[in-house]
Amino acid sequence: MADTADTITGIECPVYLQYHFTAGRAPARFLTRIKEGVLSGQRCPRCSNVYIPPRGSCPACGVPTEEEVELPDKGTVQSFTVVAIPIPNNPIKPPFVVANLVLDGANISFIHLLSECENSEVRIGQRVQAVWKPREEWGYAMDNIRYFRPIDEPDVPVAQIGKLPVTGREG
Amino acid sequence: MQQIAIVAFSQSDCLARAGAANEVELIMPQLQAVYAQVGIDNAQDVDFVCSGSCDYLQGAAFAFVAGVDALGAVPPIKESHVEMDAAWALYEAVLKIRMGHADSALLYGFAKSSSGELPIVLSQQLDPYYLAPLWVDTVSLAALQARLLLESGLASERDMAEVVARSRRNALDNPHARLSGSVSVDELLAEDLFVSPLRRADCAPVADGAAAMIICTVEKAREWGVPYALLSGIDHRIETHNLGMRDLTDSVSTRLAARAAGVEDGPVEVAELYAPFSHQEIILSRALELGDDTRVNPSGGVFAGNLMMASGLSRVGEVFRRIAAGEIRRGVAHATSGPCLQHNLVAVLESAS
Amino acid sequence: MSTLAAVVGIGQTQYKTRRGDVSIAGLVREAAVNALQDAGLEWDDIEAVILGKAPDMFEGVIMPESYLTDALGCNGKPMLRVHTAGSVGGSTALVAASHVQSGSFKRVLTVTFEKQSESNAMWALSTPQPFSVHLNAGAGGYFAPIIREYMRRSGAPRDVGIKVAVKDRLHGARNPLAHLQLPNITMQEVEESMMLWDPLRFLEACPSSDGACAMVIAAEELVHESPKPPAWIRGVAMRSEPTMYAGRDEVNPQAGRDCAADVYRQAGITDPRRDLDCAEVYVPFSWYEPMWLENLGFAAQGEGWKLTMAGATSLDEGGDIPWNCSGGVLSSNPIGASGMIRFAEAARQVRGDAGAHQVPGAKLALGHAYGGGAQFFAMWVVGADKP
Ligand SMILES: [Zn+2]
């Protein structure tokens, strides 16, 4: 009988599977445009809400979305968290701010980094703008925008977040 | 017990690669098609929604969550998901209607398995300690089963080629087919072996796509005023995972499910069988005790294109279509899951009149 | 219209970081055998098995029902596999119940599990996809901004989450199966634990556990064959909404409100705080207790935190509506099973079989699970009395 030192309680079986991921027609279009530095959303034909990044459907109405809407790179902090632990496979150093941001003219938030700010001063309703990577580094990816940073505009009242026109705060 | 009616079905073309379309984009046209068939607007107009898909086929956890984006689930809906072929979503929905918590249900299944190497991916479905580390792929396991069938004398390579030739010929009438055509048995037998004793032609061509269906109570079907088929029986059974403990030349679970679903209670004019490999159609036909008067896979079956996670539901849909069109009065549909026909579902559909 | 059904057997495993003593099959079998024993039944008494778990990628086994057939005595029987994200444990119980409530089966076994120690869940959840910035900092990173918005809306004091974290761990210390055993935990200790996703601290988040939970559900006519008191299923409901849509209230999701209203209506509940004796609610992050107190109608909007702070949800403080007496998800979290544990623990309470975390005289209890971006909900109400 084997002593406990020989008892096998696990074996290593690494699994390698390769996938060729497809983003989808609508996200692919979004990625094509963002390579050109353009933020392009889609408007729902039924409820008129604008989604970015677009997924090709309005989840609320269950209908395909086709109309493209070009959006500015300015937006508002809908909410945020300060993350104190590293992200696997990501060089970013904690603590960093992850925020739900809504671009002007969009009706839904997406997640991105917030930087060039005191973490303790980030707040709901704060105005922000994208900081892009150098043009020569742009690819088909959302991280063409390195992060967003606060800008000197008055905060947006909570009830208005997600409802601003493409012209933004002053619109 | 509440009688169940099938009122709508649609499936996508079987595409070798769905190209740029993502899952939501694959599902939506099929949903729109079944809505149109019964004259409803969206998932708000049915009482329950259930889908079937598999995260690993597209390589992302929670892949099915995006499917909800296709539904228009605002206000919220009653919705569930099986990590199985959508034929089992149909099964879950049948229970829901029988218990009186729904009068109608929308089912859909979808996959974009071209993203990965399907036979290799599915090898990770096996016992994780003994089998998965060996990376035995699904084609090899099926070949093992085919070998046993041939050696037992229950079928010949010619019989297998006949399945393929007939399926491809039948698929000529299937507008969604990925593969169809006239090919002779001798031509097929002249092809090289792929994974012995299987030739490439013995393996159903895998396809990207989606399928959707609407079922309801008979009262609801009459209210909608659309032709329908009765789902008079449905049952499914699983068998041991240990291939060495099964008689791979038979499908005991199919026999059990067929008996419970009432296959033998009437003539079977059409049988749509989910047989991803030619020899499996032979095994299934025997297990279902189909006679010469049954047309097997008039759609071409999955040899027209194997829509992963939707092919089982599509088999039910194909039989429904023929009954609703008045072509036949009674038929059987079959779905399978797991290596070498481990898990089988059998449904009996009948004309309402 | 539906057949009356009851829980007649419950089985759970010990929850811990790593169950190196059993395989995946051994883990589910342990829960299933415990449930059969509790129900006084044998494998042959079971007509079908309904299995649930969160993503296959958590263990790296695709469609594990295929491999688990033998361990669950399912050869020749129907086996269904449910996956509805984090709510799956609850959904699986509901699908199992529907097997009986539909009149199709007399007695079924349902099992859920997670053995996260066998794979890398963080990896499983972070397969890179090109259209989003790769910022997956765990579920906490997703839910923390939502919690922040709740704090803003309700004006709740900052220590509400800390109080929940302490309360649920003190409950967990009464439950020998609970993963975290922290009988001496203090508010100060939670407050001083590392801030992971501000405002969530380490001790305000759930652990990651190996474990399985099983139940036997029987039709009315067979309930008497099991020796212990049954937990009658008085209401079942599920609701889903999309992860994101314009105008979605992520703090107080409509799917949760609708689901609760549905299950209360079936169970004849008009005032959940008054009518229910206790609840097992999916609270993986401390702040979700006050948020769900409001979402589930135990408190008015913006006032859930007041119940928490007053001790209303605490067994130790003699609260009138104890929540998560078992210690909840904050004490044990085998993801795929976590929802079913809520359902099973609600049933244990009304069976009078909850041991040291029993609510005295509990007759009616709520089991709750949620998943995805707090978008999938599953609930049931179980009672000691036959409806
Ligand atoms: Zn819309």
Image (cartoon, coloured by chain):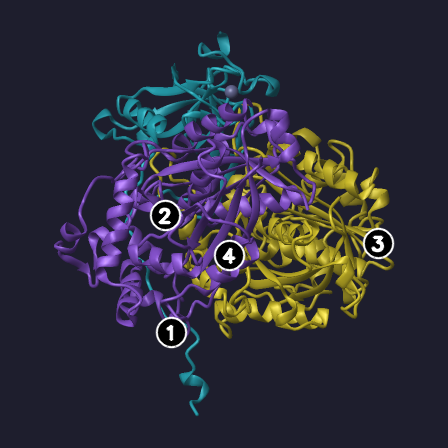
Question: In this rendering, does residue B246 appear at all?
Answer: yes
Place of residue B122 in the rendered image (x, y in percent of width and height, measured from the top left)? 35, 56
Question: In this rendering, does residue C252 appear at all?
Answer: no
Q: Alpha-carbon distance for marks 2 and 3?
A: 45 Å
Name the mark on residue B244. Answer: 1
- Residue occupying image coordinates x 69% and y 34%: C258
- Residue occupying image coordinates x 65% and y 64%: C178
- Residue occupying image coordinates x 81% and y 41%: C272
Q: Of the residues shown, which amino acid type is indicated by label 2?
A: Leu
Task: Mark 1 vs mark 4: give the one in front.
Answer: 4
Q: Which residue is mark 4?
A: B258
Rendered shade, chain C:
yellow
Q: Which residue is mark 2?
A: B57
Nearest the viewer among C172 and B170 is B170
Name the mark on residue C386. Answer: 3
Mark 1 — on which chain does it sit?
B
Secondary structure of residue under mark 4: helix
Rendered shade, chain A:
cyan
Q: Counting other residues with Cα less than 10 Å from the Cα at mark 2, is it few (<14), some (14-19), or many (20 or more)? A: many
